[in-house]
Structure formats: structure tokens, C-alpha cells
Image (cartoon, grey):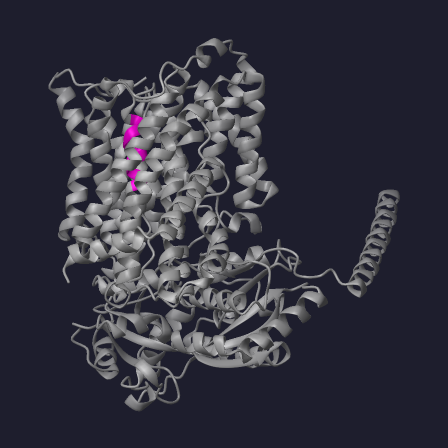
Amino acid sequence: MNTLDYLLHGFGTALIWYNLLFAFVGVLIGTAVGVLPGIGPMSGVALLIPVTASITGGLPPEQAATSAIILLAGVYYGAMYGGSTTSILLNTPGESSSVVTTLDGYQMAKKGRAGSALSIAAIGSFVAGIVTLIALIALAKPLSDLALKFGPAEYFSLMLLGLGAVSGLAGKSVTKALIMTVSGLLLATIGIDNVSGIGRFTFDIPWLYQGIEFLTIAVGLFALGEVFKTILEKEEEDTQMAKINNLLPSKEELKESAGPIARGSILGFFIGILPGAGATLASFFSYILEKKISKDPSKFGKGAIAGVAAPESANNAASGGAMIPLLTLGIPGSGTTAILMGALMMYNVQPGPLLFEDHPQVAWGLIASMFIGNIMLLILNLPLVKVFAKIIQTPKQYLIPIIIAISIFGVYAVQVSVNDLLLLVGCGLVGYFLNKHDYPIAPLVLGLVLGPMIENNLRRALTISNGDFGPFFTRPISLGFLIMTVLWLVIPVIMKMRGKSVVINEEA
Amino acid sequence: MFSIKRISAVMCAGALALSLGACSSKETASTSKKEEGTGYPTKAISVVAPSGAGGGWDLTARSFTKVLSETKLVKQPLTVENKPGGGGAVFMAEYATQQVENNDMLFVNSPPIIINNLKKEGNSPYGYKNTTPLAQLTKDYGAIVVKTDSKFKDLKSVLEEVKKDSTKLTFAGGSAPGSMDHLVSILPAFKYGVDPTKIKYVSYDGGGEAITALLGGNADVIGTDASSVKEFLKAGKVRVLAITSAERLSGDFKDVPTAKEQGVEAEFTIWRGVFGPEKMSAEAKAYWEKAIDKLVQSPEWKKEVETQGWELEYKNGADFKKFLADQETQVQQLLEALGMQK
């Protein structure tokens, strides 16, 4: 049988009535999980495993495995659809992968374009979902080999590119962006070091052993920062927020988003394949890319639709990409795929290099159901835009307590620690002052994500090469990333020196 | 000065009396509770794998929870949580301090709980004595693994190469230096007369990432547990050069010689067990000992252990605790020989 036959068989499996029902229930719960902060895709899937086990109990083992994984995977990519909602409407990222969506999504909502932002997020997620599935079918095998080629040197160079691209997140001043980036990198060093197992800046306080939680910082700086701003500055712009111009994106908006969605899908897919990199980086990288190649980068951060379309496509594409190492190698690339792997094992389906040969029904049934699930999600999400967009019409005196409650609930649900709540409130205050003095917050958050990855992979690569920096330049993929990093940093400067009128972030 | 000292002494005594009072009242409260029975477990149970996904702890935790809920031995929902970092030390630091009375959180561990507590670098101040050992579930063995297209066909050729020039070969494992994967990687070389501190060892976040590094050619040899490379061995992706068991294993590993067979006296058993918090209530402890006792008798568990390529070895709480004390002495000797003891 060739791939097409397998796929048709897969559709045969996925279109059985109860599997359609499972896919629908999965994406429905996934959407809810995505919208509610605190319950991320990981805990959502984990909580549902025992439930699905009892629902599918009556089916023969192979079919039960297929049905269960269809439902659970539905939760996974459904959450990627829903994750944008609170980011756009309340400036409160529910998942780390939708942090970057707040930058332009919230600005769009403020300008009365919440409907467009939410719809384009859903459409972008849909396109990304379909693109990645096609890529998954066509390229799974060669791409899993490519993912294996990524050693510590390649990871390091890729992360360095991400860090070099931080200027893309700068506001008015690159200096301020760099200060924030370094602060993020420094914060990331707190905790017990993963490579040596030695505690750094922990002062023997157990709470610090785990390091500083990314979501606490992000929610504090973004959401509570905004809350403090509203309270302390007593802005009277309620009327501005209340208007919702349209629920669906206009023709121009769709045209403007086509490119970002396509690029976000492809970029997100490739980053998703790499174990450990994941949806958060994918969303950051795609945002930065869009800003860099945009004709008018000054629009970003002020409500550019590309700033919503690209990262939302990318994080969904990354969740599809992460299925490749899971299905072809049995290596989970993210926390959520690890849980999915556990679910498969519960049915005696051992994910590994032999999955496609030993259990074609499970593998292809899942892939086919992801097509169907993505279509369901689009149909489900577009009408919901109307409902969600109403949230923003809530008067400020009600909206602010809601944001505070959601932030505290969300952080506590993940960390179960009062210290994190104190940190959250502290970050809110810091976020307010940073905002007031034009220090961009996104670079700090990115530094926090990239820090440990850069450091650990640098140390691994240098151990392998006996302290020689050569491999960073002699390994082609790594060299490619390094060249891109240099070009990224140098080209704008050279063009400016030549007196060309390029849009470059001027020093404040 | 005197008066201040006296006042503070009085205050101290007062505080002491108060806290003692609080203690005793708490105790009476808990005993009265015990008599009634709290109906434990009343909440969802989480079983923590203190590592990234895909490694030995992770697989054990998932099988454990899977069979317990399948056989309906535990009616509450069971979930597996991954808490990676510092070879398990990160999780222990939290568990032994913040979750010390959390009856609803168990965890899976293996020799690292002892190793981390004894080694010098990256020492974890908390060891098995800060837990309630509930049961040993399985035993597994270390495996020295290379890629299928590697030029190494047996253990000796790897060891000869390391002896000649240790900078040429990269060993990798899923946990930090001084941890179990590291010990498994270097033990054969050490027994072969190579200076273990000279061996190049790279740690990854969990066994899954270490296998990725091996398959991608970013590591030449990995030391890991036999069960987690089984699927890759069956698919023909890797070659297992040696197993650190006393006797040859059966099943998929029947063609793999032990280190001993190849003239290297490297034996290392990877036991895996389940632990509860140090101050676990008597009721919870009794509940789990009973549940696990039933679990290991069940045909479902036997089948699961077989599927995973482990070997069943059950010790109940009391035996397990005694065994751990023996293990501690053995690991201490090993670390001292390697110059890595605390």
C-alpha cells in the first residue's frame, strides 16, 4: 500500500461516527482549555486520559487507541486555536505560546478590531493546521532525519539567531530592548542548573530551585501591568474600547494576512519538529520575521494584523510539527506530546520507529482525523468570535477585576505557590513602570525562554568538541544560522551608513 | 542586656511551649481522624516522574498509573507529571519541603535518589530518608548503546578507543554528571582501567533527548537503561554493545552479551520504585502498600512489565527500605572509587 491508500484508510477510520464525535468533543474541550488561562493543553490532555480510557473501554484495543488519541490530539490543537482569545481581548496570555499575540492583538482590540483579530487567529490556525498536515504526510520521514541532525551546535546557533532578532521586538530604543533582553537572560539563570545539577542564585530557597516560571512573569508584566496602568492613570478611554467595527476581517485585512499566515505556518512547522523548541519559540520567531520583512515595521505593536496572524499560525503549525518526532521516532518534542505518547502506551501502542508499520490504523486514523478536526475548529470558532468579542464591551470597572482574577487563578493553577502570586503582583508593578518609560517587555520574556536553551546547548556543544568553537562554523546548518544572525544585525546598519532611508529603530 | 536576654529566653520558652501545644493538639486531631478514616484517597493522585518525557522514570510512572486505573485498584484518577531538572534534585527539593505531607503525590525513582544524595557536585540535600519508600517494582539494567552504523561492534573496542584517546568519543546520557546514566556510561571504562574523569560525557534533559543525540550522530555512545532502547533495537536503529546484568537477558535482548561475558566486571542493577512523602499519613501508607501488593500480583501488571522489557522484582515497603540502606553503602563505595563522593 502506498501513502495515499493508507491515508484513505485513515479517513475511513476517522469518519466512523463515533470517531467524528470524539474529534468534535476533543476540539470543543480544547477550545475551552485554550480560552481558560491556567489549564494549558498539557494539563488538559493529562486530565482527560482517564476519562477517555473509560469511554473507549468497550471498543477493541486497536480501535480504542485510535479513538482515544483522536480525542486527545483534538484537545491539543484545539487549545492552540483558543489560546489567542484572552491574549487579544484582555492582554492576558493563557498559554506561553500566545504571549506574543498580546503585542498586536490587544492593540487591535483597543481599536475596535477585536473581531478581525479573533477571526484572523482562527483562520490562520486553520490554514496552518492544514499546511502542516500535508507536510506531515509528505515529508514526515525526511524531516525526522533532519530533526535528528540538530545537535547542540545547531540549537545554539538557532537560539542565537532568535536573540539577535530581538531588535525586532524593540520599541523606540534598541538600547532599552537590549537591557530588557539581558535582564531576561539573567533571570533565566536562577535555579538548579540542568547540565551540572548545581544551584545558582537559589540562596537555598527551595521555591527558587525550579527557576522563575515563564508564565508568571509574562502574565504579570503584560496583564497586570496593564491593570496597574489603568488604575494609576485613570484613563477615560472606555468609549474607545467599546466599539467593535466588524466581526470578520475585511478584504484588505485578509490580503494583508495571507503572507504572514503562510510564512508563520512554514516557520512554525519546522520549529515544531525540533524537540524542545516548541510553539512558544515558533510564535516569537514568526512575529519577529514579519516585523523585519514588513514594509512598515512601525505599525507593529500598534495593532498590525500580521502581528496576530503570523504567531497564531505558527503556534498551531508547531503543534503539528511536534507530531513528527512523536509518530516517526517515538520521541516527544514537547510536554503535551509526551502526554499523548503516554496515552498511546496505555493502549499497548508503543510509539517508536515502528509505529507506522505496526499500527497503521492508529497513525493514519489520527492524521486523517486532524484534517477533520481542523475544519470543525474553524466552523466552531468563527461564530464564537461574536460571543467573545462582547467581553471587551464590558465596562472597565468590571473588566479589571476579571483580568486580575483570571491572572491570579491562571498562575496559581500552574504553580500552586503563593510565592508565585507575590512575584506576579511584583511583575505587574514592574511592568507598569517599564511600560511608562518605554522599556519593551517582550525581549525580557524572550530572553527568559531562550536563556537556558542557549546556555545548555553551548555547553553541550563545547563538551563534545573538547572546548573547540570550530563546530559552530563547520557544521553547515549551524553556520547558516550564524550567517543569518550576522546579516540580520549588520545589514540595517550598513544601509543606514550609506544614507539609505530604511526604517530602522532609531536610538532614543 | 541581662533583661533583654531574660525576656528573649522567656519568649523562646513560651514559643516552644506554644508550638509543642500545637503539635500535640495536631497529633490528637490526626489520631482521631485515623480512627474514623478519611476515606483516602479522596482526590486525584499525581505520580511524578522527576525527569523529561520518554526516559525510564517516565515510562515506569506511566505503566504504574495505567495498570492501577485499568485494574480499578485505585478509583481516583491518576496522572503522571514530568518535573525535570538536576537529575531529579530539583523535584526532590520541592517534594521534601513543600509537599512533605501531600498524600496525593507519589513519585517514581531509582538509584539516583541515593546517588544524588551522596555525590559531591550537584548534591541533593534530600535522599530516600526524606521519603516514605512504598515498594520496589522492577529491575532493569544499564545498556551501552551505539548507532547501528557505528564502527564499534563490541564493548572492548569502545573501551580500547577510550583508553587510547578519550577526547575522541562522546558519551551521552539523560542526566547530569555524577548521576546514574553517567555511572552506567563510565562504569565499564572504569572497570577496564580508564580514568573516569577523562571521559567526555554530555548530559541531556532526559533519556529521549539522549537517544535523539545518538541517532543524530551528536553522541557516539550512550549509557542508558536497557528497556528504553528496546523499540530502537527492534527497529534496527541502534546496536546494544553490553548489558550490565549478571546474566544474559531474555526476549529482545537475548543476543546482547553482558559486560561480564566480555571480560568487563561491570554490574549495575537499576531498580525502580515508588515513594511517598516523608510525613505520609499511616492511612495513606497502608492504602498504597495494599494497592501495590495487589497490583504486582495482577496478570495485567505482569503483562505490562513484560511489554516494557523490564523484569519484575517486588519488594514491599519494609524490605525496600532495608534494600535501600544496602544500596546506599554500595553506591557510596562506587562514588568513592570514582572520587565523586561528598
Residue at image position (31%, 52%) is A14
Residue B65 appears anywhere in the view: yes
Residue B137 lies, in percent from the top left, at 51, 76
Q: Main secondary structure of the magenta part?
A: helix
B217 sits left or right of A345 in the view: left
Is A265 placed above or below B172 here?
above
Residue at image position (19%, 20%) is A295
Is B291 placed above or below A208 here?
below
Residue A254 lies, in percent from the top left, at 24, 23
Relative to the observer, which residue lies in front, A458 or A249?
A: A249
Please report the bounds of the magenta region as a residue range.
A307-316
Residue at image position (44%, 77%) is B303
B132 sits left or right of B222 in the view: right
**Residue B334 covered by magenta stretch:** no
Residue A398 lies, in percent from the top left, at 58, 20
Residue A181 appears anywhere in the view: no
A388 sits left or right of B314 in the view: left
Where on the picture, by quarter, is residue A357?
bottom left
Relative to the observer, which residue lies in front, A471 or A304?
A: A304
A62 sits left or right of A209 in the view: left
Where on the picture, by quarter, is residue B53?
bottom left
